Amino acid sequence: MVAVMEAAVDGFKTCIQENEIRENTIIHAGQKYQFNRTSNKEFSTIFGKSVIERRLYQDENGESFVPLDHAWNMENQFATLEVREAVLFAQSLMPAREARQVFDKCATSTSRNRPSRRSRRTWSLTSKTTLMTCWKPFARKK
């Protein structure tokens, strides 16, 4: 089962990274951004944790923008919508300690899928409006 989960994480990562913008200069919200560097970020997904390499752009004032995060509504997030919803749903029905026990029982690899203390604290502070955002699949390239 662990091999299946690892394959799912790799497939998820590949799907997301295939939609990365490869331009040196982009315009977002009327602001011009130049490519600065690549940046790795770890995301918690329903398949486990996945480190995704993203292109980071900066404007003339040093403000950063990551188009890939923006494209799938993951700006300032570390867990996908499905993971956030599952944790919040579990915590609405039971104390955090019991919710963690449920996730420990359900996880194929407890170290990969268990919510950390930081994530539990953050999820408990997640607003209702964050949960209302929906992940829209990327438009197919023609």
Image (spheres, rainbow, N blue to C red):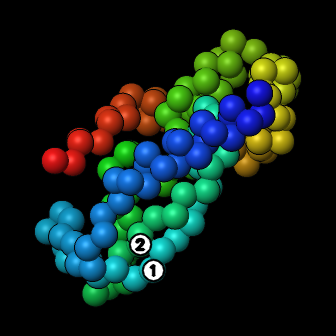
Residue 27 in sight = yes
Identify which amino acid the numbered label 1 is placed on: Arg
Compared with 94, 70 (above or below) is below
Image spot of residue 122 (x, y percent): 64, 44
Q: Residue furthest top?
A: 93
For the point 43% across and 55% down, the residue is 17
Judging depth in this view, the residue of 81 and 38 nearest the camera is 38
Which element carries disc 2, helix, strand or loop? strand
Quadrant of residue 119 within the rendered picture: top right
The disc placed on residue 139 is: none
Q: Residue furthest bottom?
A: 60
Which element carries disc 1, helix, strand or loop? strand
For the point 23% across and 41% down, the residue is 139
Image spot of residue 70 (x, y percent): 35, 54
Q: Which residue is mark 1?
A: 37
The disc placed on residue 56 is: 2
Residue 121 in sight = no
